[in-house]
Each structure stands twice: as C-alpha cells, then as structure tokens.
Image (spheres, grey):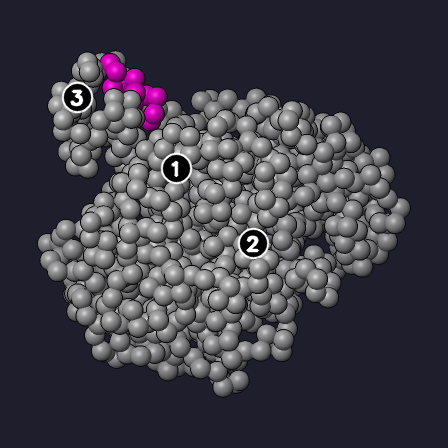
Amino acid sequence: MSRRVVITGIGVVAPGSGGGTKPFWSLLTEGRTATRAISLFDASSFRSRVAAEVDFDPAASGLRPQEIRRMDRAAQFAVVAAREAVADSGLEPEALDPHRLGVTIGSAVGATMGLDTEYNVVSDGGSGWLVDHAYAVPHLFGHFVPSSFAAEVAWTVGAQGPTAVVSTGCTSGLDSVGHAVELIREGSADVMVAGATDAPISPISVACFDAIKATTPRNDDAEHASRPFDRTRNGFVLGEGSAVFVLEELAAARARGAHVYAEISGFASRSNAYHMTGLRTDGVEMAEAIRVALDEARTDATAVDYINAHGSGTKQNDRHETAAFKRSLGQHAYATPVSSIKSMIGHSLGAIGALEIAACALAVEHGVIPPTANLHEPDPECDLDYTPLTAREARVDTVLSVGSGFGGFQSAMVLARPERRAV
Amino acid sequence: MTTATREAPASAGRPATARAVFTGIGVTAPNGLGTEAWWAATLAGRPGIRPVTRFDASGYPATLAGEVPGFEPKDHIPSRLLPQTDHMTRLALTAADEALADAGVDTAALPDFAGGVVTAASAGGFEFGQRELQALWSKGGQYVSAYQSFAWFYAVNTGQISIRNGLRGPSGVLVSEQAGGLDALAQARRQLRRGSALMVTGGVDGAICPWGWTALLSGGRISTATDPARAYLPFSADARGHVPGEGGAILILEDAGSARDRDARVYGELAAYAATFDPAPGHDGEPGLGRAAELALAEAGIAPAGVDVVFADAAGVPELDRQEADALRRLFGPRGVPVTAPKTMTGRLSAGGASLDVAAALLAVRDAVIPPTVHVAEPAAEYALDLVTDARPGPVRTALVLARGQGGFNAAAVITGDARPRTHH
Amino acid sequence: MAEMTIEQLTRLLRDCAGEEEGVDLEGDVLDVPFTDLGYDSLAVLQAAGCVERDYGITLPDETVAEATTPRLLLTYVNERLSTPAAN
C-alpha cells in the first residue's frame, strides 16, 4: 500500500499573538477572539473595518533585515512558521538529503499587501494608467509571482525537492497540504515542509470584499464580529496568518523516534462548477469530497469524532456545509461536534485551511475540541452541534476538516491518530 | 443550472498506474490564435514578437512583447463574462474551448465528478487588478469592482474553465513561475491516477499592462533590445534576456483507458515528469534542472539516447543558458540531442510557456518534424548544442520538455508518441 | 435628482455585467426576475455599486437580496433619491 504520511512538526503565526503554536492553541481552547478594528491601515472609509490581525514583529521573529525588506508580510509569516515547524519536528535539516525535501505553500491572494502598497507608489496614487517603473522596488518581481513564497521557505529549510505554491483560493491551505501528502506517497519526496500563508488585510482586499458585501459590517462590536452559524451573522471577518507543517512518512518518523501529531489519512477536492463566489444550498460537491477523503482514509463516516468546519460566517456557507455534513455523514452528522475557529481568528483566505489543520492536529494531540465563539443563537437552518462558546474535552481519534472557496473549490481532509489504523 | 443528480463516482477501482494521454490541444499564442494557425507559423519560423500594442510602452526600457494577434474577446467570450474577466482569462477560456472541441469531449456527458481542471498561474489577472488598484487609489474603495475578488486571483482560470464547462472533479492551481506549465500537467496526471477520467490542464498567462511590465522589469531578465529579431536570443553569444509574451496552451489529459473507450484520437502520452528546486542563492550545489531531466527519464524508463528532441527552457540569460547547456551536455554528450526553443517566436509566456512547448512536442510527434528556434543563427560554441534552427523533418517518438521558474523552480516532462506499455523502474 | 428609469438601469446592467444571450433587455423586463435576465447576485451587486457611485446614494445591504426584479431595484433606488436625508 502507499506510504502513510504524518505530521511531525507544527509552526503557526496566527492572530491573537505575535506567532507561535502555543498562544494559538491557548486562544482557541479558551474561546477567546482575536478580531478587532483594523489597525494595519486607515480603514475608516471602508464598509467592513474589522479584522483578525497578527501582532507580528518580523525582527523579533528572527527575520534578518534583508529578509524583512524583500518579503511580503505573507512570505514572512510562512518563513517564521516553517522555522518553528522544523524545530518542533526535531529534524536536522542538514542531515536530510535536500533532494528528497520539498516545499508546498498555499496562498489565495499572494503578496496582495506588497502589491497594493507598491502600486500606489509607482502610480503616484493611481494618477494614470501608465506607471513609473523607476519607482519600483527591486524585489517587486517576488510580489508579482507568489511562487517566491515557496522559494523563500525552500531556502530557509534547504529544500531542493519538488517546490511550488498552490493557489486555489480559500481551499489553498488544505490543497497545499494535500498536495504535499501526495508527493510523499508517490515517492517524489520523503519530507515535505507544507502549509499556507496569507496577509490580505490591505485596502484592495477590504475593498473587493466590501463590493460583494461578503465581510461583516459589524464594526461597533469587533470582538464579536465573526459569528459562524449564529442567526445574527452577516459576513466573514478577514484574518491573516500562516501554518506550516513537517510531513514525513510514518515509518521514517517512528524510526527516528519523532513525535507524531496525526496522520493525514485522506484528502479530496471537488468543484461546484456553479459560480465563482456562489454556493448551491445542497452541498453536493463538498459532500462528495468528504466521501472520497473518508474512502481514501478507509474510515467509516461514523468514526468521525470532530468536524472542523469552513464556518466562514456567511449565510450561504453555513447552510451549504451543514447540508454537506448531513449528506456525507448521515445521522452521524447530528452526533458529531462541529466548530469553526474562524469565529476566533477570522478568515485568512488561503492560510486558514492550514491553520485549521493545525487546530485539528492539536485537537487529536490534546483531546480538546475548540469551540465556535460568539454562537449564542444558532440559525434555525443550522441544526448540528457547533460546539458553542466553550471548548470540550473529548477523545479525538479522527477529524474531518473542510474548506470551501471562490472558484467553486470544495476540499476535505481526514486526520487520524495513527494508532487507529493497522500498519 | 443542472440540479444535482448523483451518479456512481468515477473514482472506483482504477489502477494506480493509469496512463495519461493527451487528446486535445487549444492554443492562444503570439504567433497564432488557434492550434493550426500557431503550428503553421511555428513550423514556418514566423515569430510573433513585436512592439507592445496593449499599452504605450515607449517610456519603458523594454518595448517588445509577444501579443496574441487578432483576438477579439466578444467573438470568443459570452457578454456576461466580459466584465468579470482579465484578458489572460479570456485567452484561457478560448484555448479550453478549442482543446475540448479538439478532443471531441462532451463534458455534459461525463459522469459526475469525472472531469477536473488544473492550471498553472503566475500573476493572475494582473491587468484587471491594475484597473481596480487605480480605481482604489485614485477614487476610493467604493469604486472597486465586485469582480475584483476573483478576477485577479491566481485560481481564476481554473475556476472559470470549471464553471464554463461543468467540470466538477478535482481542481487545482500551481504557481511556480515558468515551471508551472509542466507542474500543472503532472498534477492533472495525479488526479487521473486517483480516479478522474479527464483533466483540462495547462497554462495560459499574460500581464502585458504597465503595472505588469513594471513588475516584469524588476525581475531583471527582460531584454531591452528594440529589434524583434535581436531581442531574445537564447544560447547565443548575444543573449541579453527574454521578451515577455502572453498566451499558452490548454491540453486535455485523459486516462488512457477512458480515451480508448471513447475511441479518442491520442496525440501522445505524458510518460514522465519530475520537479526539483535549486540550492539557495549563495549555497553550493548544482542547479536542479539536469537532475529533473534525469529523474523524468528514469521514470519513463528511457535512456538519453532514446530522446529525439529537447524543448529547452531557453532563458536567454547567459548564466542560465550555460547551466542548461551544461545539463544537456552531461546527459546527452556534446551535440548529443537536437535542442529547440520555439519560444523564440513567442517570447516567454510565464505559466503558459511550458504548456505550449508540450503542445509543440505533441504536434512534432504527429507531424514528424522538429519546430525551429528562430533568430539564433548559431549557438555559442562553448555550449556544444545541436540547436535546431530550421524545421527538421524526421520521426519524433520521445520529447523532453524542460522548464525553469525564476526563483529556482525546475521541471521536466517526457512526452512520448508511443503508447505501448513500458517497463517501469 | 431625477428618477432612474428602466432604460438607464438596463444600460447600466449591460455596461457593468454584460448581456445574456437570448435575453432582450429592450423588451418589457420590469418584472422579469434578474436571474431570468441572466444576472446573478454578483451582477446586481455590481450594478447597485455603480448606482451608488453615480447617484451618490447608499443602498442598504438588504437591497440586493430583496430587489429581485428591475422594478423592485428601481423602487429602492428612487426612494433613496427622493429622500436624500436618509443617506
């Protein structure tokens, strides 16, 4: 059978702190929220002015001045998270064959923040269609093509195996890690440093979500603005951050005595072929992705102990995935705790899928299911157990994590405690 | 919209060694809109590199580009899609239409979830993004389009192709600069191995707008020559960078069994692929392009002597040309294999270039001819390359396609016309 | 400010969201649902955004969800235009 792939290192940069897996997990398990009034730029003229921001200090996070200058904030997050993940895994990068070490980084919107800023300069405030290239920063190309994110991480960890950015909108995080798992299984790499990053809290992103009223206008109550599955929710809250993992083959991890957080036992993606931003209410494609991912994991639907929902806090999403869970898990959907950590750390677009994988791995590790914050009064059409307000202790052996993104992408991943499967 | 009727999923019980064959080609290229126009121009050595027309480039250090000729969007794209698509997405949708028609596939007749889309991207719908950034910074956030949220982002071509053609299977988008045009095909092949029947794949790209131009210039590899015949001269002693272009190819990659079941015409097989990454700048070690080629040939079970042609990455930057020539010499010996770079006619198409090279490899197999490299009278002697500078007739059974993405990305694909079973390593 | 007319609205829709094949926007479309005219919610949002900017008004969030036909959208817009204080 194909090689089994496990997570042996986790690195996180998430809202609510300056970075690090520990503060991330504390925030989630304490049910605190990191949403607040946007401070990264003057958002006073925008409709939605709340976001979940990272209190990120790149120098304090170990980045050198030249790295800070040339990298977009999203790339900085990814490099910092990758370093934490490698340290956490106990791998000595120098001891690895660099040719067998690869990198995949997911990102939905690339270096939006850097591009937004640099465009303003070269165009002198958008004064004309022609822009002045003489004002371009030397590292603009790295913002232009976000494959630079994967390159930066590869340089950091010394990878010379398969390396790429995966960019499938808001499923980028799940798809990036799913892709990395596939590369190990097929034998193209032995170790993958894989995850996702996004830093979209900039005027152009806020404006484009304003234009489709996808983000919440709950500006006077920023702390409680992200309200997935709640009757009063009215849009998502933009977030930012990164999570990166060290993935390796189970047998190799055991042989070196590594700590194994969880196995990634199944993954699948499907497309709704319906609309770039819209979702049908029936959830058929997400249900199919879940079915195939469970099938690949050789896991019965009734074995799922926890569902980490996409839970963005838009009405159409909440109903869409609730339907998908029922369609794929049947009656078991009603008995399974579901939660959305976007209620606490917002929606960091392509990064969130990786942050959610981190939450799932930590749920398996610690036997704690993070809650859905701000859920006081469920939407009557969302009638599952969404783990409102407070974390729950529970044995968590099998987790399902899902994502849904612009472009019609629907992805599902199954994580499991490796002991659950016969070797 | 169709309602959801579930049929048996296509994923059941396919072998993990499924072969992936190309059954359709769609091209939008600077030297020809449509596969046959482009291929005729390519064999005739007719280039599409000209002064930029999409904006006034006279104030910029580089003034030449490969622009797709005669593309009238409303002739190809429904009115409803025009306000929400960047130029490069319109080119991609047009190429996808041609590829599906060429393959004779009725996507509506495919089983549910049996068809998916994987494309390569580099900068997304950058011209669309420039327009919205200008609106934002000059007038204010409320002037930003409702379509900005997806018209710029990197997943746009995959999403729009999936929606337009009702393809509900697995989708993907890879960004690895110019290597992406091969990486996407490999990802499509993985999806076939996981049970899909058909994948629409490849890359169509372009950012020929002032903001894109500025970003491209910052990459430091753009030729500033003004003579279209002297601007992009890979492997020449006069190499001075490349000319950027737009366009690329969308290809239909099918499970060999599915293609046989529907009596599809098969152009060739994606027999093997490998990707590597260069050592970090300032670190010792060989660049990874040669290793990617070796790995791909090993997977294909083909010795270097079995390769009939190499479609080179052809960076047009002396140091990079030398690296590629070194890799080819090590693998094939001096002048050991015909090498060509038809991209000298189109410029480098970012995520679209390598997919277009695969299209060229498939048609080279079909027509038993190697398309030429133009403008390079002869390669620098030190490279010891057999560079094909006039269309060269002769059987082509196996082609090696190489691609490098700025930043250190390398990919190699082996395309064979021979669909007989091979022994695998 | 003068009321917005159906002719102005259809022109705006055509400009900012294109035109569905087989739909005659010159015909009597006042009460034809936007979806039947080939316009999804994104198209209506885009049109509503243009109206807001061109006419200097703000439409409430519910407008697009509730204004399912050109007549309903025009009613919302013209109510807004006649009560500038509401902005």
Check the image and report above or below for B249 versus B16: above
- Is residue B191 shown left or right of residue B409? left
Q: Which residue is mark 2?
A: A69
Give x and y (percent) for residue B255.
50, 52
Pair 1/3: label in front: 3
Callout 3: few (<14), some (14-19), or many (20+) C-alpha neighbours within 10 Å?
many
The rendered magenta stretch, by its main secondary structure, is classed as helix
Q: Are marks 1 and 3 on the same chain?
A: no
Q: Which residue is mark 3?
A: C81
Q: Amino acid at mark 1?
A: Gln
Contact, CB < 8 Å: mark 1 with mark 2?
no
Q: Nearer the viewer, residue A289 or A168?
A: A168
Pair 1/2: label in front: 2
Q: Amino acid at mark 2?
A: Arg
Q: Kindly identify the residue that appears in the image at 80 percent across and 44 percent down.
A: B235
Q: How far is disc 1 from disc 3 in space, using C-alphas?
A: 28 Å
Q: Which residues are magenta?
A: C7-17
Callout 1: few (<14), some (14-19), or many (20+) C-alpha neighbours within 10 Å?
many
The answer to if C9 sits in the magenta stretch is yes
Q: Quadrant of residue B53?
A: top right
Contact, CB < 8 Å: mark 2 with mark 3?
no
Q: Are marks 1 and 2 on the same chain?
A: no
Which quadrant of the rendered structure holds the C terminus of chain C?
top left
Q: Indicate the chain on which mark 2 is placed.
A: A
Q: How far is disc 2 from disc 3 in space, using C-alphas?
A: 49 Å
Is residue B258 among what the camera can see? no
Q: Which residue is mark 1?
A: B148
